[in-house]
Amino acid sequence: MTPGLFSPTDLIIDVGTTHTVLASRQNDFFVRRESRVAIRYTTPPRGGPPTAKVEAVGREALDFNDAKEIRVIRPMDHGRVVEATPLDLMLKAMLSQTPGRWGRLRPLRGFGGLVGPPEQDAEQRLRLVEFSQTLARGSVDTIDIPMAGARRLGFSMEDPHGRMIIDFGGGKTCMGVIAMGGLVAWHTAHFGGQDLDRAIAVYLERKHQLIISPEQAMEIKHQIGAVYPKAKPAKLQVDGIQQNATRAKKIVVEDQEIREVILNAMEPLNLAIQAGFRGVTPELCGDIARAGVTLVGGSALLEGLASHLSERLGIGFYVGEDPMNTVVMGAHEMLLENRGPSSGKKPQTG
């Protein structure tokens, strides 16, 4: 029997503010794209609503920034759906690009898993579930981020001692305390790596009268950004537009000034983590203090983050192995455990 054509197939869906992941173990793929889509809108000659055609998804969509009749859209912001139709088109275009038979022949039936925070509001979760059911062509389970992360990290579900996991993503921060096989406390803050990017862009405009794009701000963060002093000082040339002018401008920024910007912008994260401990019993707090807090998510890769939080909050913080993929792979393991066996093959990446 051909997987993905006649038998039930699995699809895990993680729709993030900055990146979206589609994965299927039975169809052997793992696809990550930036959550961005370029859509060409064309008005029919005889009138009527414009038609929409996807030109590109992910980073490739940036190539259409200056094209006429094309909008480059980020459908998500701080973990919320802000452009429903573009999100639907982006997800379908991503699925059509997956390797193997799923990308060419849609399965007759399937099952899916949608990753999300425990306290996601009902309207947002319903919208994402509807999109996911269309992709999976079947029922969809919702999987809480902290539980998926705990599964991938190997936390024992039978352990009575509490463990805390924090998923620091591009648009939101989701944390949870796991004990006795369940989620006993959780908190979500709509703060993520994109807020640090915006802080960098605002700083450069105010301090250096330089206007840059969000993508440039992210690149600055990745190249020289840190929240702990670097062992070796670093500099970076940044190209942009002179404020209140139309001419190009170049400046050189140092890691120290970018670090100060990031540190000043980090306070919402510090407050969110403190809020995550509210309602947690003293016994579980003691467990967490002894075991430390595990950080996952793409923004957890920010240099020096764990050391900074350890000093700031007085307990140990550690970055988990493969933090960008921890949650989605843990969710995939949970989905297959509940729904059916896997092929045992290593997924293709794309």
Image (cartoon, rainbow, N blue to C red):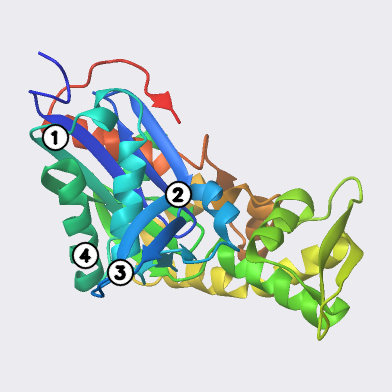
Q: Position of residue 155 (x, y in %)?
A: 36, 37
Give the residue type at disc 3: Pro
Q: Nearer the viewer, residue 107 or 221?
A: 107
Give neighbour class at mark 4: few <14, some 14-19, many 20+ (Cα, 10 Å).
few
Q: Earlier in the sequence, mark 3 or mark 1?
A: 3
Q: Which residue is mark 1?
A: 338
Please identify, in this view, whether the residue under mark 3 or under mark 2 is nearer the observer.
3
Kindly tell me whether residue 147 is visible in this rendering.
no
- Among the two numbered marks 2 and 1 on one chain, the one whose residue lies closer to the N terminus: 2
Label whose residue precedes the other's in the sequence (3 or 2) = 3
Kind of residue at disc 2: Val
Residue 186's disc number: none
Kindly state the secondary structure of the residue where label 3 is placed. loop
Residue kind at label 1, given as amino acid type = Asn
Between marks 4 and 3, how big is the CA–CA gap? 33 Å
Q: Quadrant of the C terminus?
A: top left
- 14 up-or-down from 78: above or below: above
Residue on which the image places disc 4 = 127
Report which residue position mark 2 lands on: 57
Distance between mark 3 and mark 2 Cα atoms: 27 Å
Q: CA distance from mark 1 to mark 4?
A: 23 Å
